[in-house]
Image (cartoon, helix red, strand yellow):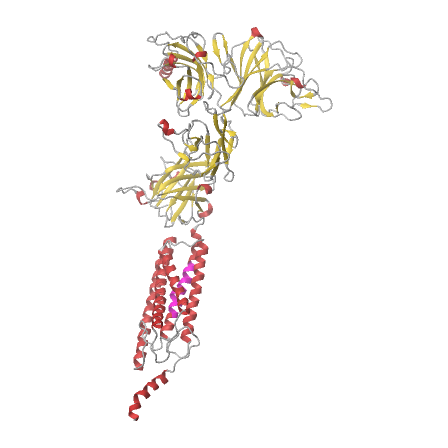
Amino acid sequence: MLRESILIFIFLSLLFIGYADPSKNCTRTSPFVDSESEFEMVQHQLRGRLKILDDCSFRVSQFDMLSGSDVRFWGALAIDFENLTTGFIVSDHNLNQTYANSTFVVRLMPNVTWDMIRVLAVWDLPTASDFGHIVIGNITGVNASSPAPAPAPLSGEGMQKELGGVHTEPTMFDNCKVLMKDFRVRWSLNAKEDSIEIGLESATGLMNYMAFGWANPNATDSEFMVGADVAVSGFKEDGLPFVDDFFITKYSECVINSEDGSAVGVCPDSIYEGPDRVGLVNDTKLIYGQRRDGVSLIRYRRPLSQVDGKYDHPVDHLANMTVIWALGKLRTPDTVQPYYLPQNHGGLRFETYGNLVLNVSQHVDDCKGPLDAQDKEDQHVIIADAKVPLVVSTGPALHYPNPPNPAKVLYINKKEAPVLRVERGVPVMFSIQAGHDVALYVTSDPIGGNATLRNLTETIYAGGSEAHGVQASPTELLWAPDRNTPDHIYYHSLYEKKMGWKVEVVDGGLSDMYNNSVVLDDQQVTFFWTLAKDSITIAARGEKKSGYLAIAFGSGMIYSYAYVGWVDDSGVGRVNSYWIDGRDASSIHPTHENLTYVRCKTENGIITMEFTRPLHPSCGREKRPECNNIIDPLSPLKVVWAMGDRWSNDHLSERNMHSFMSSRPIRVQLMRGSAEAEQDLLPVLAVHGFMMFLAWGILLPGGILAARYLKHLKGDGWYKIHVYLQYSALAIIFLALLFAVAELRGFHVSSAHVKFGITAIFLACLQPVNAFLRPPKQTNGEQAPFKRVLWEYFHVVVGRSAVVVGIAALFSGMKHLGQRYDLENANGLNWAMVIWFSVGALTVVYLEYQERQRIRDRGFGRSNWVLGNVEDDDSLDLLSPTRIPVNKESRASARMEVQLEPLNR
């Protein structure tokens, strides 16, 4: 009881405030006091009556309006565009809600008087939109000597009249009856003039009809429509309203017999009178028609009793009579039937058609509040195509969607102020031909005209002062909306307010919105990313239905940084970050990463999440877990995923955790933009590594050892071994290089391994070129030429340097492979190579010792020592298979004979 008493008290208090009397402190000197009028509807289904109570207040009653963003009562000096847009707020009263048959009293601001107001409007401040207004000079009871502007003409076939001392608008009626959820009939009876004015109002499509009329009084319950007299109304293709008098002879669309010209079905009255299709008078007279916010309103007048009895039924305004109604699609005129004809309404009874008993003399008002159409936008929609330029021009304002507006507005592809729909990631090309006084720009401001001049801020996405041109010399403007572009922005002129309209930015394919993508393990999740200078933008899409999607950076979910996207119970998409250090729910710790441009949505259970984060978290000296979550674009990023039925940020439990997850991490090369799972490259890289070890660890060192330590053997076997091993090694090196480049689809110098490898291959390739350019060797007994000595130094230094750098490439490659794939045996393979090359080094030491012993045993002879090479024949041509070996014994004998010659004497 206490709760009910409180509610009753609040209701009575509000009622008292709503119907409050004018303030006792206000005077009543203004000539407008006690005058009444009705609001002219402009937008947002605004209706209502206004009465000026005194010099500082007025009462609004029967007020309907759809909500806006920041709506106030607004004063202006005239109804034109310039005066309305430069008007002023007249009251602190805020109208930021939907109103349904409301009544309330409004006080003017202390510094505002009725003399300052010639137009009182309901005004939305952010969009500079006129929802509805009253011209003060037109309302009744005004002193004739008070100045007032001329009344503004109504749109369409409007009317203004005074009925019962109150200025009325064509959107207001005395009665209203709900026929169905989105269809109403309104009427005002004038029995003295034997007429009734009817308004058909429906939240329906632009090319749909509204039908209403009186059934045949003699019809049975199942045959109400046959023999009915109805009015069919709607809007033509050019947007003009129409209403026609129809008669129903059969449950079918209107069909004309080609032989005798007779008509059956739902046909206009005038079509029944012979093949010339003229005869009967259309008893319905159009008064007014409008379409606002997806709602159609047609007002027409018809006589009550003075009608033709053949195709029209007289209406007894005092009797209960059966009326019928229907909604459906219109068929446009053609050469056979030059009428707008209703098609079969289809649907269920009382959803698209129905009947009821109505007495038009009884007051009825069961229409509480305005109709709220789901689709309020009737403007043309232009869908941008990356291959076709959008032609921007200007033209007269005929059906501008956001009045008030200037006389000239923007046209796109010859459509007046259309909604422009673009896709993220798909470039849009404008061909601007609107004149040099119109500079096109895409802005966050709903009014345009350079918001900075109004002391406001705006974001300009494209265009500006240079984006102007004419038809003979158009200007091309290219704009590429990205994933950070808001869903709703605007195109306008930089020099004039409210010339353009909306831009709908929709998600295209994620592959268009992001530079790179890769399918993660098990083919269940696709990972997208775009790198910027200091940040990375990431998206992930699950390929199966789930309640949440998580991606994590690490070798597994444990000890990883995870990002979870889900849609909560209120329908809001969320993306949160976590540090995971265990397998249970208590090991999932929320972090405070700086995630921006966060979005998460679900379609048919498929979740897509997006976010932007810095590459290096801004932690300063703090020691939070996420401070170590650094993304290095040059290093591979390990990515795993998980999905499940439900996620909760507040009460996470074992039930909320993942139902299934990836079986292994995938390494993503961010800089390369690879679209492949790098994990699959392990066998190829293993073959690459083995072939490089064969070349740099066995063949090339073996060739060098053959040239160094096998020359004392007879013949040129050492030479053949040297050449064959070196060329075989080069062939294997190039083959291994092609394997890696082909599988990685590119050649990227990004790691120490690649840099060592390129250097080693370059040095190895110098050796054949060096051998081709070798200078001739010296003849027996001659001093080696300087060029020959220089060549020998270069040949030996480059060859041995190549082997050293190649061995460094082997070790760095093994380290790189271990880091990339977390190979447990990477260290073991490194130690195996250490042992292998250590044994090789000991072997070289032993062979060098044996070579020196052999030279020492020979006791004498010329020694051409080159970098430790003590072989006396080291300066001979190493690469010529036809060289003539010098007989060492003959050379020694010759020298002996020279020494013994004096003794013979």
Question: In the current view of this chain or complex, which residue is farthest to the top?
Answer: 192
Spot occupied by residue 709 in the image (x, y as percentages of width and height)? 36, 74
Farthest residue, direction left = 621
Relative to 825, does residue 380 appear above or below in the rendering? above
Residue 802 in view, yes or no: yes
Magenta residue span:
686-703
Location of the N terminus (image quadrant): top left
Task: Find residue 717 and report its horizontal and vertical position in percent.
Answer: 42, 76
Residue extending farthest to the right is 259
Does 695 lie within the magenta span?
A: yes
Judge by depth and name the residue closer to the eye, 346 or 652: 346
Residue 264: % across, % down:
68, 21
- Residue 393 placed where, x, y %? 49, 31
Left or right: where 353 falls relative to 583 = right
Task: Kindly give the residue lying farthest to the front in the view shown.
Answer: 472
Position above or below: 240 against 359: below
* Quarter of the figure with residue 698: bottom left
